[in-house]
Image: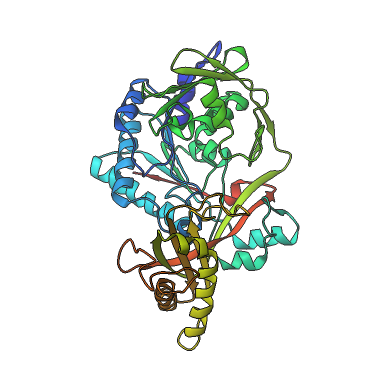
Amino acid sequence: MSAIERLRAQVKTADGLKPLRVLSASGQLGYGVPEAAFNEGLKREPHFIGCDMGSIDPGPYYLGSGNIATSEAQTRGDLALVLKGAHSHNVPLLIGTAGCAGAAPHLDAVLDMVRAIAHAEGLHFKLASIRADMPRDVVKHAIRQGKVKSLGAIADLTEADVDASTQLVGQMGIEAFQRALTAGADVVVAGRACDTAVYAAIPGMLGYELGPAMHMAKIVECASLCTTPGGRDALLGTLETSGGGSFIVDSMNPIRNASPMSVAAHSLYEQGDPYRVYEPEGTLHVDSAKYEQLDAHRTRVSGARWAPAQQFTVKIEGAAKVGERALMLAGCADPRAIAAMKEILPAVEKTVRELTAKTVKEKYEVYHRVYGIDGVFEWGGPPRELPREVFVMVEIIAETADAAKAVATVFKQFTLHHGFPGRISTGGNLAFPFTPPEVVTGPAYRFSAYHVMAVDELAALFPVTVEQL
């Protein structure tokens, strides 16, 4: 009997469906799973365990480079914990967005870890993997047919953008996970996936209402982040069927309390629209949701609605290499230099470009950020009072690492000694946190695709492979 068949036998009765217990082990596997809370969750006898491994939050580097954002040792430890937990309770384990970004290199690296852990621990199960790499000819064809739209104030996707992307993935929804489970999987490791898909696929297969199931998935995917004080501890979601469908949010750490406010606030997490959550297969409407305090620790949520899509869509994410990056890092506590910093850095850049014109033949870009003065956001005007110290970061992106380092090195020296009104000392106006103050960080990437593609079917885009371990 497959994992999904076992679950169906457990929850289906002549009178309907029993409550379904869903354990969210981690909001992002690889950063450490608080073990006490996870073990407490296992004591509650969950019907399945889910965990997400990533998002685009860390920026385009991990997607573009194919590298995993978390350390290998920590990632292995987290994977071992959830694999052994699911195996010991004979319940399915679903993992989404493998290796942070969910492209082929990330998925393959995580699958290798899973196989190694299973071998070392003597675990035997059916493992399904789901690829999320988008066929470039399919995306290009969709562009030509006008089926690809930008998200927000982003330029239209071009075929050149597709070609420039070192990795190009699409976000799968519940359909792909359901195919993997239908194929007999006990453990599913997916490439780039919607966070909600990890937790809503099984309820959808078993016949629970998708409105409450999707809303629960939206809330539990970040584990106890939806509680006060928020944290990374395991979270139990219990999907109920009485009264039209509801779910209970229960952190496995007793100090983290789910309140109507904290849970409702998490409904807004990472959403541009406070009332609708768009998924490949439809739209979750939370404007009708109700939040009820059960006790000091738990909240019940009901009332969300699910509207199936008239047109399937897939969010496309791509990253392209733009060059090699070097940084010049410095602090400043000279009030006169701070006051003049907006003029100093462009003037130094002009000097540096003149000085390196003969030695640095490659094209390069320079970006200045003064943390303390518009380093995070361009406020449109100076602060009322200048800060007593600032942090200066000058980023150089060039075609080669040597060129980027050369520009950063010259930039450091001429910033250190640049003249400005009221200068008292001819040096020492900058403080370097370490030496060398120029840091070569490696390849730099930009997001080349952040768009939505309309598709007629989903299955062909997200192939499933099953193996016996």
**Residue, far top:** 15
Residue 308 found in image quarter: top right
Count of numbered tags: 0
Query: Is residue 374 placed above or below 184 in the rendered structure?
Result: below
- Lateral position of residue 439 relative to residue 342, left or right: left
Between residue 267 and residue 127, name the one nearer to us.
267
Query: Is residue 210 placed above or below 447 in the rendered structure?
Result: above
- Lateral position of residue 73 relative to residue 379, left or right: left
**Residue, far bottom:** 358
Residue at image position (54%, 33%) is 201
Image location (x, y in percent) of residue 340? 51, 65
Residue at image position (35%, 32%) is 86
Confirm whether residue 204 shows in the render.
no
Residue at image position (46%, 66%) is 394
Confirm whether residue 396 shows in the render.
yes
Q: How is the image coloured?
A: rainbow
Between residue 95 and residue 433, name the one nearer to us.
433
Image location (x, y in percent) of residue 131? 50, 51
| Image quarter in which the C terminus is found | top left
| Image quarter in which the N terminus is found | top left
Image location (x, y in percent) of residue 343? 55, 68
Residue at image position (51%, 84%) is 354
- Lateral position of residue 50 relative to residue 211, left or right: left
Query: Is residue 9 placed above or below 198 in the rendered structure?
Result: above
Image location (x, y in percent) of residue 227? 46, 27
Between residue 234 and residue 184, name the one nearer to us.
234
Query: Is residue 15 placed above or below 64 in the rendered structure?
Result: above
